[in-house]
């Protein structure tokens, strides 16, 4: 039906985006944005899964307000980003349980679940670059812009280059709006705002000889923060083979 092909939905954990496809000359519009407060998908504990399921269902339900009445089988994409990539490294069992719950809730809706998974880092960089150039009309003006995106757990960078895809393993040839673009795309896991701050705090504690108190020269005067040992030392960005490889 017209409704099935014209309207699409993309979920990015907390956000809902509804786009229009190539029937409108490949121009993409965001018709709606929903923000759900709380923790990221990868931070939910098993005892709180019923609440997570409730929030997901509420998100799907609210997304209906942007669709024409009576529309069914609307394509839906559900993507998670760096937080879930880190959880996969830290606790594969919990990672699998969360995705089982996500797919269960998706399959219970009247949407057509086209794709639901964790974005690889380079894909996250690519999609952010595409979004940036849609908003800046780079594709219309045939002059694209580069992109640096800072998230909570990672930083993405992407820009068009003259080199071919064979020149570098991080360069991909992508086809968009009838043109082929050689795009350098990379994601730096653990370099996001939250994980970067966690590493700073861990280094401060280490420099203080692992004492119960440490001075933070970057915090405001009089500001105190408390971090548990588990918060600082049990994550892939601070301890373990992954941290050793990255840093």
Image (tube, rainbow, N blue to C red):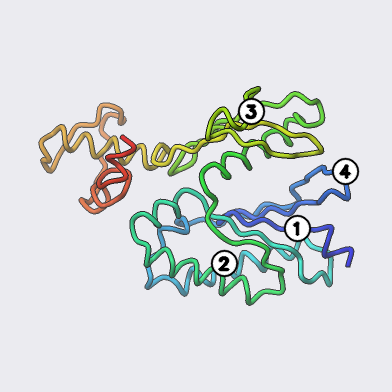
Label 4, label 1: how many angstroms apart (C-alpha)?
15 Å
Q: Mark 3 or mark 4: which comes first in sequence? A: 4
The residue that disc 4 covers is 25
47 or 112: nearer the viewer? 112
Report crowding for label 1: few under 14, some 14 to 19, many 20 or more residues within 10 A (C-alpha). Answer: many
In this rendering, the answer to whether 52 lies above or below 247 is below
Q: Mark 2 or mark 3: which comes first in sequence? A: 2
Taking the spot 42% from the left edge, 41% from the top edge, the residue there is: 189
Q: Which label sits in the foreground, 3 or 4? A: 3
Label 1, label 3: how many angstroms apart (C-alpha)?
32 Å
State the image coordinates of residue 200 (x, y, percent, origin top left).
Answer: 29, 35
Q: Which label sits in the foreground, 2 or 4? A: 4
Q: Quadrant of residue 113?
A: bottom right
Taking the spot 76% from the left edge, 65% from the top edge, the residue there is: 74
Labels 3 & 4 near each other (Cβ < 8 A): no
Q: Mark 2 or mark 4: which comes first in sequence? A: 4
Labels 2 & 4 near each other (Cβ < 8 A): no
157 or 214: nearer the viewer? 157
Question: Is residue 38 toward the left or the right of residue 71 in the image?
Answer: left
Q: Mark 1 or mark 3: which comes first in sequence? A: 1
Label 3, label 4: how many angstroms apart (C-alpha)?
28 Å
Question: What number is the disc on residue 56?
Answer: 2
Q: Quadrant of residue 218?
A: top left
Question: What number is the disc on residue 242?
Answer: none
208 or 177: nearer the viewer? 177
Labels 2 & 3 near each other (Cβ < 8 A): no
Taking the spot 31% from the left edge, 39% from the top edge, the residue there is: 245
State the image coordinates of residue 195 (x, y, percent, origin top left).
Answer: 37, 42
Question: What number is the disc on residue 164?
Answer: 3
In this rendering, the answer to whether 80 lies above or below 165 is below
């Amino acid at each position: 039906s017209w409704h099935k092909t014209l309207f699409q939905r993309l979920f990015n954990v907390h956000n809902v985006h509804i786009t229009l496809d190539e029937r409108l000359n490949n121009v993409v519009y965001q018709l709606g944005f929903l923000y759900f407060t709380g923790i990221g998908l990868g931070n939910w504990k098993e005892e709180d899964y019923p609440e997570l399921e409730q929030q997901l269902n509420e998100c799907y339900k609210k997304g209906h307000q942007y669709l024409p009445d009576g529309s069914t089988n609307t394509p839906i994409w559900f993507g998670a980003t760096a937080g879930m990539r880190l959880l996969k490294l830290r606790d594969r069992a919990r990672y699998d349980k969360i995705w089982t719950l996500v797919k269960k809730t998706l399959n219970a809706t009247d949407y057509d679940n086209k794709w639901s998974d964790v974005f690889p880092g380079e894909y996250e960089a690519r999609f952010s670059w595409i979004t940036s150039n849609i908003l800046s009309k780079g594709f219309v003006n045939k002059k694209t812009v580069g992109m640096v995106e800072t998230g909570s757990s990672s930083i993405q960078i992407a820009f068009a280059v003259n080199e071919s895809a064979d020149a570098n393993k991080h360069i991909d040839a992508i086809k968009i709006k009838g043109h082929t673009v050689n795009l350098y795309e990379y994601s730096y896991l653990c370099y996001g705002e939250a994980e970067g701050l966690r590493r700073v705090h861990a280094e401060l504690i280490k420099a203080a000889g692992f004492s119960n108190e440490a001075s933070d020269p970057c915090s405001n005067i009089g500001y105190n923060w408390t971090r548990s040992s588990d918060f600082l030392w049990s994550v892939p960005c601070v301890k373990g083979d992954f941290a050793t490889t990255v840093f």
